[in-house]
């Protein structure tokens, strides 16, 4: 008599092995540059802050900056214009008059 073994197929799908959130390049709602640094406008559910991001800097001329979201904002507050994240030139490893390029895409948010 043959015995059959039930194999949990969800293991084949990687259940529990892959995170629901993956780091990704943030789509920017806006950007502002002044003498003190750079301010990125990003989508938010109300709990987004600088600790949710990291900056990738490609060594090139001009320097290439990319804002990467590392933590998901799980809050559900209505923040139609997102939030602003300010980085000083010192935080970015730049001097005030250094040339740079921001590689993130610019987009918009649908407001309900």
Image (spheres, helix red, strand yellow):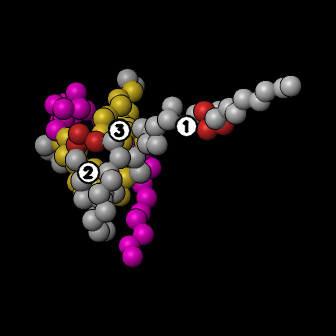
Q: Quick one: 86 or 21, which is closer to the camera?
A: 21
Q: Using the numbered discs, state the Cα–Cα distance from disc 3 to disc 1 in whole angstroms.
A: 21 Å
Q: Is residue 75 above or below residue 10?
A: below
Position of the C terminus by quadrant: bottom left
Q: Percent x, y for residue 100?
A: 32, 36
Image quadrant in which you'd find residue 79 = bottom left
Nearer to us of marks 1 and 2 is: 1
The alpha-carbon separation of the residues under discs 2 and 3 comes to: 11 Å
Vertical position of residue 16 compared to residue 85: above or below = above
Q: Do the numbered discs 2 and 3 sit on residues whose CB atoms are within 8 Å?
A: no
Task: Tell me if label 3 and label 1 are in contact, CB under 8 Å.
Answer: no
- Left or right of 57, for residue 85: left
Whether residue 13 appears in this view of the structure is: no
Q: Earlier in the sequence, mark 1 or mark 2?
A: 1
Q: Percent position (x, y) of residue 96?
A: 17, 35
Identify the residue at image location x=18%, y=32%. Answer: 91
Give me the residue at 33% from left, 42% from top: 71
Which residue is identified by label 3?
A: 70
On screen, residue 42 versus residue 92, left or right, reads right
Q: Is residue 8 left or right of residue 88?
A: right
Give the dominant element type of the magenta stretch: helix, strand or loop. loop
What residue does disc 1 label? 15
- How packed is label 2: few (under 14 Cα within 10 Å), some, or many (20 or more)? many
- The N terminus: image quadrant: top right
For the point 33% across and 53% down, the residue is 74
Assess whether residue 110 is covered by the magenta stretch: yes
């Amino acid at each position: 008599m043959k015995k059959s073994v039930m194999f949990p197929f969800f293991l084949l799908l990687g259940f529990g092995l892959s995170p629901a959130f993956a780091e990704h390049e943030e789509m920017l709602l806006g950007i502002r540059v002044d003498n003190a640094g750079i301010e990125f406008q990003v989508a938010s559910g109300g709990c987004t802050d600088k600790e949710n991001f990291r900056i990738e800097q490609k060594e090139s001329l001009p320097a290439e900056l990319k804002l990467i979201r590392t933590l998901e904002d799980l809050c559900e507050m209505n923040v139609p214009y997102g939030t602003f994240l300010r980085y000083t030139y010192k935080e970015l490893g730049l001097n005030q008059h250094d040339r740079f390029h921001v590689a993130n895409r610019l987009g918009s948010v649908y407001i309900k």
